[in-house]
Amino acid sequence: MTAPTRITIDELRRALLLVLDAVEKEMGAVVDLDGEQYWQITDQAAYNLVTDPENHLVIAHLSDDVEEIRDLLARPGDEYLAIWHEIGHLSGVLRRIGSLTLSGGG
């Protein structure tokens, strides 16, 4: 068994597939994100609990997230990925989907 703060890529992949399958079942094959701007804390401050998060909030845009995800999918498979950048856009969309499932809307 792995330590609680470690995860295998296989575990992460299977968990994401389970969640995405549940989203598709509940919301359909296309999700209307029904929003645009949202608050995001910078990566530099998110895991530094000494830092005042108020000074590290930025406004992010779902339309930018979706555009970046589509650009990622259109790239050749062997092209370099800025993993932190791609995960940031994916997490913005996934967090919005999560918020839409709370009490019928975000």
Image (tube, rainbow, N blue to C red):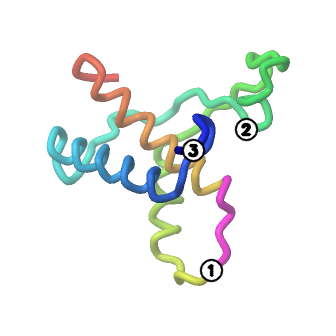
Label 2 Cα neighbours within 10 Å, binned few <14 / some 14-19 / many ≥20? few
Tell me, yes or no, whether the highlighted magenta stretch contains residue 83: yes
Tag of residue 3: none
Give the alpha-carbon distance from disc 2 to disc 3, as whole Å: 25 Å
The residue under label 1 is 79
Which residue in the rendered view is the most extreme toward the front? 1
Give the magenta-colored segment's residue range. 79-84
Assign a secondary structure to mark 1: loop
The residue under label 3 is 2
Query: Mark 2–mark 3 contact, CB under 8 Å?
Result: no
Q: Position of residue 99 (x, y in %)?
A: 37, 27
Q: Nearer the viewer, mark 1 or mark 3?
A: 3
At a point 84% along the width and 17% down the height, the residue shown is 50
At a point 58% along the width and 51% down the height, the residue shown is 87
Count of numbered marks: 3
The kind of residue tagged 1 is Glu
Query: Mark 2–mark 1 contact, CB under 8 Å?
Result: no
Question: Which mark sits nearer the N-terminus, 1 or 3?
Answer: 3
Q: Is residue 67 left or right of residue 27?
A: right
Q: Position of residue 45 (x, y in %)?
A: 78, 29
In this view, 89 is above or below 36:
below
Q: Is residue 10 left or right of residue 98?
A: right
Question: Which mark sits nearer the N-terminus, 2 or 3?
Answer: 3
The kind of residue tagged 2 is Asp
Give the alpha-carbon distance from disc 1 to disc 3, as whole Å: 31 Å
Question: Which mark sits nearer the N-terminus, 2 or 1?
Answer: 2
Report the magenta stretch's main SS. loop
Q: Is residue 68 left or right of residue 53?
A: left
The residue under label 2 is 43
